[in-house]
Image (cartoon, rainbow, N blue to C red):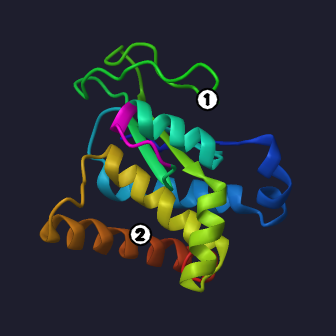
Amino acid sequence: MSEARVDIQVDARFQEAFGAARLDQLLLDVAETTLLREKVAGPDRVTVIITDDEALRKLNREFMGYDEPTDVLSFNTAPGAGAVPEAAQDVPGPWPDVAGEESEALGDIAISFERAVAQAEAAGHDLAHELSVLTAHGVLHLLGYDHAGPDERRLMFGKTDEILAVVAEKSGGRASG
């Protein structure tokens, strides 16, 4: 497999806080580490979109049937992933028009910056850690992992912990905080 390719897109409202914390490189490292550890072959292009609760609420309603904001959603656009409905026009991001096109795109991950801030505060850790967890979680979903049952949950969250430990070791502890 060629080196993973990850694109981070941040809503203009959050760019200052995101850039000041130098989160772009951290999330690139988390996504690429996840892909390199878990992806055997096939599409490996991932876009991580940092947006707001309202955008996640719209996406959650349209794709999952839940009219509430959520922290992270993953949209697998790789061939064989199944049809992906067209997203709402006013939600930012490179959402797919046609699933299954010949492409190197594995998929897109949307993360609510507002939800990440609230969850980090509630859990007593920093924003960098929360966004790292959400990024790894989103990429693992793109790769087919789920957490519907207890065994799946242990596996997925165990892999998340392993990925964050690898990234923390490479970056001097940044993803583990």
Task: Locate residue 154 relative to residue 160 in the image: left or right.
Answer: left
Indicate the secondary structure of the residue bearing disc 1.
Answer: loop
Task: Locate residue 118 relative to residue 100 in the image: left or right.
Answer: right
Q: Dot 2, crowdedness within 10 Å: few (<14), some or many (≥20)?
A: many
Indicate the secondary structure of the residue bearing disc 2.
Answer: helix
Q: Which residues are magenta?
A: 63-68
Q: Quadrant of the N terminus?
A: top left
Q: Eyeballing the image, is 106 above or below 174?
A: above
Q: Give the residue drawn at x 45%, y 14%.
A: 97
Looking at the magenta stretch, what is its main secondary structure?
loop
Q: Eyeballing the image, is 155 above or below 73?
A: below
Where's residue 161, x and y in %?
39, 76
Q: Dot 1, crowdedness within 10 Å: few (<14), some or many (≥20)?
A: some
Task: Locate residue 9 relative to residue 62 in the image: left or right.
Answer: right
Where's residue 176, x and y in %?
54, 81
Q: Earlier in the sequence, mark 2 or mark 1?
A: 1
Residue that label 2 marks: 163
Is there any visible trace of residue 37 in the rendered image?
yes
Is residue 114 shown in magenta?
no
